[in-house]
Image: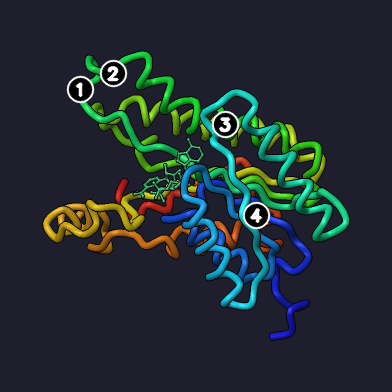
Amino acid sequence: MDEQQLRLHGKVALVTGASRGIGRGIARRLGRDGALVAVHYATSAEGAHETVALIEKDGGRAFPVGAELSAHGAAERLFAELEAVLRERTGEGSLDILVNNAAVPGPYGDPQDVTEADFDACYEVNARAPFFLAQRALGVLREGGRIINISSGITRSAQPDKIAYAISKAAVDQLTLHLAKHLGPRGITVNSVAPGRVDNGGPMFSNPAAVERMAQMSVFGRVGQPADIADVVAFLASDDARWITGSFIDATGGTLL
Ligand code: NAP
């Protein structure tokens, strides 16, 4: 296909946490759809370079951008680097698509055992960082832009042993709701995509008994793959989804049914 016919041709996307797992799947898919993709990572520079190489192998364009998101000022630092690279590559610092995907999973255990430090460690990456990244993006997002927040099916079910993580993801859904109204006049849509169990390449997914247990949670009898989520994100990023905003898209493979 002619490059100019690709549905995200001319668009610039930032995908946080794209050094592996679902974020890598999203970055690859947006790259295949023609976007120039900023592949964000925190500790895995090697993983981010691998994602960039995979995108380039598919004929796409991408570059890595590193930032630890738990610290104050992280959004500013990330965008300063991002804009510098974009100005070099495109002549301007504008962005079209922000995918807030980076997150930490824990803490897991009895609600009584969650410490303030555990809670903060989860909340600062999963909830505070997406808010300040979105806030910082407002100045550079073009009309018709997209903010896609990766939530979790856990926000619609009760799992007391993951309460702190669930609270952090529920905050992401609130980010979606309120920003969607705020950004409507600029033609920018804001949506949440909620995965269920998705094989992110972590150790749990090489344990056949654990995979079988997780597979049974979905009505389709399998665990999700990063592409199952990436395809939904690609739809929301495209012009086909221009009339959808403020939505919570259940991408759990029917886990909540
Ligand atoms: P993952 O494989 O654990 O990867 C997490 C990504 O986030 C990595 O790229 C990591 O970067 C980045 N990250 C972690 N801590 C960070 C920090 N402090 N600062 C900046 N970046 C940080 O994740 P995943 O399982 O693919 O999940 C992706 C998204 O889907 C998350 O929002 C998660 O909550 C959501 N989700 C996942 C599942 C699932 O079953 N996998 C289910 C529901 C929702 P580095 O590797 O460079 O450190």
Structural distance between the alpha carbons of marks 1 and 3: 26 Å
Where residue 123 sits: x, y (%)? 46, 25
Q: Amino acid at mark 2?
A: Val
How many circles with numbers are drawn on the protein? 4
Cβ at disc 3 under 8 Å from ligand 1: yes
Query: Closer to the observer: label 2 or label 4?
Result: 4
The outermost residue toward the right is 91
Residue at the spot of label 4: 38
Which label's residue is closer to the chain start, 3 or 2? Answer: 2
Q: Amino acid at mark 4?
A: Ala
Front residue (pair 111, 53): 53
Residue at the spot of label 3: 129
Q: Are marks 1 and 2 in contact (CB under 8 Å)?
A: yes
Residue at the spot of label 2: 114
Q: Residue at x 75, y 69 (%)?
A: 9
Q: Is residue 102 above or below residue 51?
A: above
